[in-house]
Amino acid sequence: MATTTPKTLTIDEAVARIVNLDYIPEGFTLEEMLSAFQEEAEVNLEAAGPFSLEDDLEDMEIRLQACNARLAFAKSIQEALNNQIEDINLGKDSLIDISPDNGDQSRLTSESVAHWASEQYGIDIPEWRNSGETPANISWSDVTIKLKANNRITFSNKNGSYKSKTMLEIDLLNRTTNTLNNQGAILLGLAFGEKYPKGSSAEQKDKTAISKLRRSLVALTNIKDEPFFPFNSADGWKPKFNLIDDRSALDERAKEKAVHVEFKDDRPYTPEGDEADDYIARAEGRKR
């Protein structure tokens, strides 16, 4: 049975999904549940005694370490989300959106949490992303992606399906400056035929960046396969899809339309002042 995606959720509910805790009983908090797993692992290890098999003791120690790490990670994510809410209350920009119907506690939109988790921690929550249905029998080689004016991006596939989104929706734009972020700049560079990364090897920051770009491309197309050919020193990460910088198409169409506009009035006319400047600019535009 399909799980219904919540539109809004509490911080505990958001963190529970991020740390993959599937159930919080009513009346308990996320921290209490994770602490319970931690305490159980600790008790089992202490009760094992010196006569337990070495392999069993090692498994118990690993389980306790994992439970400790999971609890610490959850606390860090909770703190980070609380800081995001505090920033919003102070009028600062945030990747998180708060529902206007908060009630007694802040409720976050699931889609914004998915974007935040992906952008900040590389954690994908596909059921919370608004990416539409998965196309049938479509691979990346069937896809053409176009970068458009006004920070929009489109894609089409062999079936003629077409989708348009803003770059902000798929995390290619900096929310504060409204300019391309790192993964957006990488995509633009690939559209120009540039190699990424420029060197012969991939550093950790390059691997992180290409991972973020992949999530943006999946959010656009909903194609889960790997969108890039395997990294090699000669080509870097090369896209499997067609990529076109189409941002100037609107200007080109405007120029083409201007060329075909005929001036019907045969009377002599001599413009003056600002009007003359506008007239010259239009004339030069027609010549180009």
Image: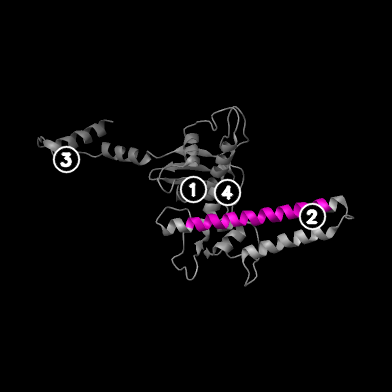
Q: Which residue is tagged 1?
A: 171
Quarter that holds the C terminus: top left
- Of marks 4 and 3, the one in the foreground: 4
The kind of secondary structure the magenta stretch mainly shows is helix
- What residue type is disc 2 on? Met
The magenta stretch is: 57-84
Task: Point out the tag, 2 or 4, that comes first from the N-terminus.
Answer: 2
Return the x and y of residue 258 as percentages of the image width and height: 26, 39
- What residue type is disc 3 on? Lys
Q: Which residue is tagged 3?
A: 264
- Could you give the CA–CA distance between mark 2 and mark 1, rounded to whole angstroms? 40 Å
Q: Which residue is tagged 4?
A: 121
Return the x and y of residue 19 as percentages of the image width and height: 63, 56
Q: For this view, does 43 lie left or right of residue 134?
A: right
Task: Point out the tag, 2 or 1, that comes first from the N-terminus.
Answer: 2
Can residue 271 be seen?
no
168, 278: nearer the viewer: 168
Quarter that holds the N terminus: bottom right
Q: Which residue is tagged 2?
A: 60
Would you identify the image quadrant in which residue 46 lies?
Answer: bottom right
